[in-house]
Structures are given as C-alpha cells and as structure tokens.
Amino acid sequence: KHQPLSFYKEKLGKSFKEFKIVTIIRNPLDRFLSIYYMPDYNMKTNFFVKKINRFTKKYLDNYLFSSRFYAYEAPKLNLDLMKFYINNLQSQKSYLSFGNKYFNPDYLIKYEDYNQGIKKFCKSLKIDYKLVHVNKSKREKLSRIKLKKIEKLILSSHHKEDYKTFKYSPLQN
C-alpha cells in the first residue's frame, strides 16, 4: 500500500514500535517512467463511458463499466508532464520519514531485485515463497538522451535524496 509511515504510526499509536518496517523501493528513474506510462493515467474510452463511470464512482463508489471498455494508449513523452509528476509526488524517502526523522526499514527490497529480495524476506520469516512476475522497466521505450533529460529533472528535485538514501547511481554518460 502506498502510505507514508506516519499513516501507520497514527493508526497503531504506541504499538507502532512493536512492528517491523518492510518496504519495496525502486530506482527513481524507473519509478517515474512507470508512473508516466501507468495504465491508470493512460486508459482511453469514449465520452459516454467516461462520464457514466465518473458519476457512478462518485455516488456509488463503484465503476459501472469495467476495464474491457477501455484501451491503453501509450503516451508520447512530454517533459512538462513528467516534470509535473516529479515535482508533485513524494520521494520514496519521505514515505519512511515523519517529522524530520528517517526510519531505516527492517526489510528493504529493491524492485529490480524483487524476486530475490522477497524470497530472502519470506525465508527469514519461514513463509513459503512462490516466484511472481514483476513488470519490467520502461527504459527501452526511450532514447538515452531522453532518459538523461528525465533523470536531470529528477536529480534537480526533492527526489535526489532517493538516489543517495537507497544507493542508486545516476545514468553514466
């Protein structure tokens, strides 16, 4: 669940300290490519279906028309839109902080090593593990020049801390 640690501290109160912090983080560049190309933001349908679904979601908390009435349409790269996402979304580090304090997770799994990380995590808790499919990065959709432009936007924002905190290296020239 994409919730900041403060959400759980508020819900759990004093018992918060009794719990382990488990998180999955992602290379910041891959994270923003994933967000940009995410189907949630890029599903297209006709005007009628869209209006009815907005209405039923608002008043009935449910969509009338399912995803089969939508089609994914991959967007063309728009650096202004990418910059909007970068500037308006929380850094991964901020999810693990409240006040001015950063909490090191007890288990940190890097998305690009998901199967290995989750296997190790499950083994440490004696939980059966089954291999799962993990979505790949969207890097192959873009040229290296465009990737460097996106990363430059990321590194000039508050997300720069994710590279340092989680030991990610920027793209090499």
Image: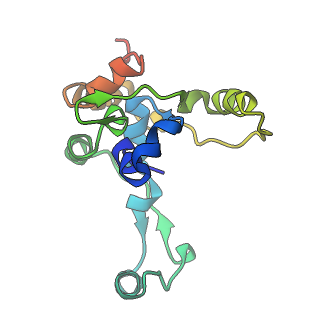
From the viewer's side, name the closer residue of 110 and 108.
108
Q: Residue 69 location, x and y as percent? A: 52, 78
Q: In this view, does 69 lie above or below 87?
A: below
Residue found at the far top of this picture: 173
Residue 56's quadrant in the figure? bottom left
Residue at coordinates 41% horizontally, 38% vertically from top-left? 31
Residue at coordinates 54% horizontally, 73% vertically from top-left? 67
Residue at coordinates 19% horizontally, 45% vertically from top-left? 80
Position of 51 with respect to 63 (left or right) is: left
Q: Is residue 44 above or below residue 133?
A: below
Residue at coordinates 34% horizontally, 31% vertically from top-left? 93
From the viewer's side, name the closer residue of 1 and 87.
1
Q: Residue 120 location, x and y as percent? A: 70, 26
Q: Residue 6 location, x and y as percent? A: 34, 45
From the viewer's side, name the closer residue of 9 and 171.
9
Residue 145's quadrant in the figure? top left
Position of 18 with respect to 157 (left or right) is: right
Q: Residue 92 location, x and y as percent? A: 36, 35
Q: Say if residue 131 shows up in the picture.
A: yes
Q: Say if residue 148 shows up in the picture.
A: no
Position of 42 with respect to 119 (left or right) is: left
Q: Quadrant of the C terminus?
A: top left
Question: What colour scheme was applied to this rendering of the protein?
Answer: rainbow
Q: In this view, does 36 lie above or below 46?
A: above
